[in-house]
Image: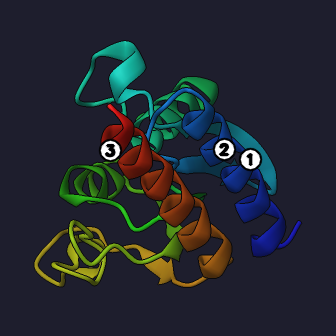
Amino acid sequence: MSDEAFMQQALMLAREAAELGEVPVGAVAVHDGVVIGTGFNRREVDRNPLAHAEVLALDAASKHLGVWRLTGVTLYVTLEPCAMCAGALVQSRVTRLVLGAMDPKAGAVGSLYNLAEEPRHNHRLQVTRGILADESRQLLKSFFERLRAKRREN
């Protein structure tokens, strides 16, 4: 499958998050062309600050492979990872990150910081940016517009 096809799966997961009232971010972990882990934001539902899409997908991938080193894994995520998630990608030794929309407010893979490609780290990821970025951005924009409208009503 192509980067776009895997990102479409991540977008489907992001839509699930939105339906639950979560910020719509989805992630898909792939190894040897097979999806081995998925996740979408669940911070509100789980009442857990660690329940980001990326962390949940990495956890599932690690359990699937039975290892913590996720060498050979590509993570597809609809929004640029935050510092916590970028750090988790580095620490878990993910080989490649494919992301949709950049996050100028909290992104740590090129926007505010670049933890994934930091030369001082003992591991760096290959990063591909902008895959289905418009779709990812539009999903986030629509979600926050609905949220603001709902707040104005109350």
Residue 114 coordinates in the image, percent (x, y): 22, 79
Query: Looking at the figure, which quarter contains the N terminus?
Result: bottom right
Name the residue tied to disc 1: 12
Residue 25 coordinates in the image, percent (x, y): 51, 50
Checking the image for residue 152, the label placed there is 3
In the image: residue 26, left or right of residue 34 = left
- Residue 69 at least partly seen: no
**Dot 3: element:** helix
In the image: residue 118, left or right of residue 126 = left
Badge 2 vs badge 1, beta-carbon distance below 8 Å: yes
Checking the image for residue 45, the label placed there is none
| Mark 1, other Cα within 10 Å: few <14 / some 14–19 / many ≥20 | some
Checking the image for residue 15, the label placed there is 2
| Mark 3, other Cα within 10 Å: few <14 / some 14–19 / many ≥20 | few
Residue 138 coordinates in the image, percent (x, y): 59, 70
**Dot 2: element:** helix
**In the depicted view, which residue is nearer to us: 114 or 103?**
103
Number of labelled discs? 3
Badge 3 vs badge 2, beta-carbon distance below 8 Å: no
Q: Nearer the viewer, mark 1 or mark 3?
A: 3
The residue lying furthest to the right in this view is 1
Measured in 3D between alpha carbons, the distance from the residue under mark 2 to the one under mark 1, in whole angstroms, is: 5 Å
Residue at x-position 62% and y-position 32%: 19
